[in-house]
Amino acid sequence: MIPLIDLQKQYHSIQPDIDAAVRRVMETGSFILGKDVAAFETGFAAFCGVKNGVGVNSGTSALHLALLAAGVGPGDEVITVPFTFIATAAAILYTGAKPVFVDVDPDYFTMDPSHLEKAITPRTKAVIPVHLYGQMADMDPILDITRKRGIRVIEDAAQAHGAEYKGQRAGSFGDMGCFSFYPGKNLGACGEGGMVVTDNPEFVRTLRMLRDWGQEERYHFSLKGFNYRMEGIQGAVLGVKLGFLEQWTKSRRQHQRAYTELLSRHGVFIPQERKDTRHAVHVLTVFHDKREALRKFLADQGIQTGIHYPIPVHLQEAYRDLGYKEGDFPISERAAQRTLSLPLFPEMEASQIQEICRVVGEFINQ
Ligand SMILES: *Cc1c(COP(=O)(O)O)cnc(C)c1O
């Protein structure tokens, strides 16, 4: 069997370091925030080329708090894409604001800036570009359009640790950048985790208060906050893993090149890297009209696949009240029907990629 991802393999490759980090937290009893979290915040912010990081308990919490720190609330609109994980839209709804969608572009599946201007209204408070699959959204036009109108930009970089756009890292373009450390992400905790990175000290102060019940001084609640703090164990484990992230990203990129070369012989479409960017290759997706048949063919030969994501947010049952309908975002809808994620993790063997591509070829040629 070839799994979609293999977290055990990663653990075993760095087990002594991880075990020592977990033990240190157990011995010190620093279970919530604390020294290891603070050190990881500093380290990860530096990795992003940003001054500050605020560790929280999930990527969803990071998005929620970033929106609140940006002043988003009831009556506001926040523009994002429907071809994303549900958390992007959910976080907007948590604030009481309304998600407004614009379609993605057909080559890279990130926010199409040519639709952005038309979607802006006097209520638009923020825009959330999503660096889907680890591919950077086209930040220059998005920043051009938003900056002159005073609209905040919050990057959903949950899939894009270490991705770059014109030599600058994901998370460093917007007013704030939001990351997830869900175990399967490029940098994964041993549980839930997330972070907001930002250069703005005012946002940092607000974010730190909001994640900890709205207090700066103990039991003096000056904001209505949340229990969104990062756990000590997650900070310690993530701090260890951060040291390997660059090496893992290089492996992911190498695997993507191998896949691209082998699959291009079969005429299978893999989204390419946007020019002047560095793709973090969170998932390796191919697009195919007979996605379900291909998926089954691979499963029958022991190859696990995933679908990121089968239904765009605007067509999800729970989000019907937003008032969108089929046909509103044709690129997202077609992408959702055709996308298929193949196994990808840094520790993969070249022979596994060859085997997967051989089976894909068999399917194409049958
Ligand atoms: C994973 C993910 C999130 C949410 O992160 P969690 O840590 O699971 O809450 C948000 N946006 C995108 C695009 C994601 O992939």
Image: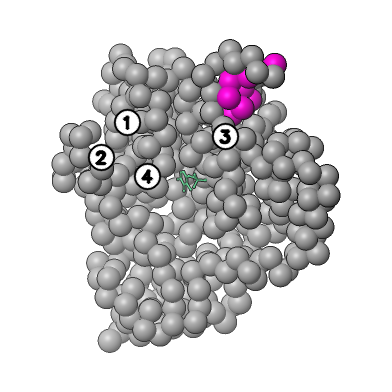
Relative depth, front residue between 348 and 317: 317
Q: Give the percent coordinates (x, y) of residue 95.
A: 40, 25
Whether tag 1 and tag 2 are in contact, CB under 8 A, the answer is: yes
Residue 271 against residue 49 in the figure, above or below = below
Answer with left or right where residue 189 lies relative to residue 149.
right
Res 99 quadrant in image: top left
What separation in Å lies between label 4 and label 1 (alpha carbons)? 11 Å
Give the residue at mark 1: 99
Q: Is residue 44 above or below residue 251?
A: above
Q: Image quadrant of residue 80? A: top left
Q: In this view of the protein, which residue sits in the foreground, 260 or 16?
A: 16
Which residues are drawn in magenta?
207-217
- In x, y percent, where is residue 305? 41, 70
The residue identified by callout 4 is: 86
Pointer 3: what residue? 228
The residue that mark 2 highlights is: 319
Task: Please say whether residue 210 is one of the residues in the magenta stretch.
Answer: yes
Which image quarter is the C terminus in? bottom left
Which numbered disc, 1 or 2, marks the residue closer to the eye?
2
| Residue 113 in picture, x, y percent from top left | 36, 34
The amino acid on which the numbered mark 1 sits, given as a three-letter code, is Pro
Amino acid at pointer 3: Tyr
Q: Residues within 10 Å of mark 1 (few under 14, many from 20)?
A: many
Q: Does mark 4 have its CB less than 8 Å from ligand 1?
A: no
Question: Can I make out residue 172 in this image?
Answer: no
Among numbered discs 3 and 2, the one appearing first in the sequence: 3
Q: Is residue 81 above or below residue 175?
A: below
